[in-house]
Image (cartoon, rainbow, N blue to C red):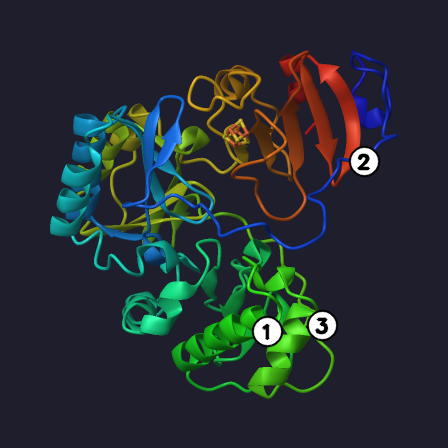
Amino acid sequence: MRSPTAGGPVRGGLRSIRRVPTRPAGPRSGPDACPGALRLHDAADGALARVRLPGGRIAAGQLAALAALAARFGDGNLELTSRGNAQLRGLSADAAEPLAAALSAAGLLPSRTHELVRNIVASPLADLPVRELDAALRADPGLAALPGRFLFALDGGSGDTLALRADLTALPDGEILLAGHRCGLPGGDPLANLLAAAHDFLDERTAQGGTAWRLSELDNGPAAIAARAGGRGVPVMVPAPTVAPPVGVLPGALGVLVPLGRLTQDQAAALLGTRAPAFTITPWRGIVVPGQPATAPLAAAGLVLDASSPWAGVTACAGLPGCAKSRADVRSDAAANLPAPGPRPVHWIGCDRGCGSPSGEFTRVLATGGGYEISRGGRILAENAPAAAVREIR
Ligand code: SF4
């Protein structure tokens, strides 16, 4: 079979002739329904809880507690998200209250009012004031009104968070980027600037009808917020540099990838066996372990330590049987059809909603019911292709 990237047919004989439809422009019809530790999502395989981990930072005792809760109430696995959070799924109907109590006891639910807005990503290898930002956010009553999708980023200077297109990104000198745009905002204290910009977002959101979930959904969002914050000049999008996810031996640390972002009990035990006091879950479904732990037990548990592994960059939504909207068991198909290592992420999804899609350009593999639609950058490369076609298309 010829590679579809070369323009040849896969099945259905289509080339790059259509574009993937995007979400229609216009205001949101209601508040976001992002799941949390208290607001569980009712999925086909049971309830789902999302535990916010600001900056992906998690103490060893907290990882042990989460793994134990997944085993006790859920399907036993911890799902890592594209924002470095952790999800428990397959929860029983009566798990909500004991789960919340156990999360509180482990320090994983420090606020009931702000738990949905503690959305903070941070450069995983940098020493950044994640805890301070989290504490300041929780101490600000007005910011409990932020939408659950609103995202803060602390960038350590490498630009590795820029591709995540956070609503507000603090650079090391305290300058704030608005939805990835440089707007001439003054530097200074990054935390104070972030909180002030978040309030500006809420004020502008109210002025524009109160429906936007993200800064980019406001009319002229970056310019409107910049005008409130004293910015100068025209907003300019800052290109995101290509930064490799931290995998393998790193300065003073070891990076591992978790295949398809689902951390098993054995893998959690192997991580805890390193005796590291804390870990950092990355937005690339990986985990940074401080120090230089022995690699053999981690590899034996199925964690990936090689950035050139076929698992690198391959992600998938829940799919069947976890999500009733899915048209296929995308996780099984993804695992059975790993592509050759390549420069772009590959993301498998069971429906057009596209949960967990990576930022930047990636290969999108959408279940259609009759196979898979494969696209990249909005261009459809193949329709109703067999799952195995992905092996050739990265
Ligand atoms: S992309 Fe669709 S099938 Fe996949 S988890 Fe989201 S809603 Fe479910």
Q: Are marks 3 and 1 in contact (CB under 8 Å)?
A: no
Q: Residue at image x 85%, y 20%?
A: 14
Identify the amino acid type marked 1. Ala
Tell whether 88 sits left or right of 242: left
Which residue is denoted by mark 1 in the rendering?
Answer: 207
Q: Which residue is mark 2?
A: 19
| Mark 3 and mark 2: Cα distance apart in space | 26 Å
Where the N terminus falls, by quadrant?
A: top right
Location of residue 117 (image quadrant): bottom left
Three-letter code, disc 3:
Val
Q: Which x, y percent locates residue 204?
A: 57, 74
Q: Is residue 230 above or below residue 262?
A: below
**Residue at image coords 29%, 32%:** 298
Q: Is mark 1 within 8 Å of ligand 1?
A: no
Q: Is residue 136 left or right of residue 20?
A: left
Question: How far apart are the two marked residues, 3 and 1, measured between alpha carbons?
Answer: 23 Å
x then y, percent, for residue 315: 52, 32
Q: 254 above or below 55?
A: above
Q: Which residue is mark 3?
A: 236
On the image, which quarter does residue 159 sit in?
bottom right
Which is in the foreground here, disc 3 or disc 2?
2
Question: Residue at horizontal 55%, vertical 54%?
Answer: 164
Gap between marks 1 and 2, in whole Å?
A: 34 Å
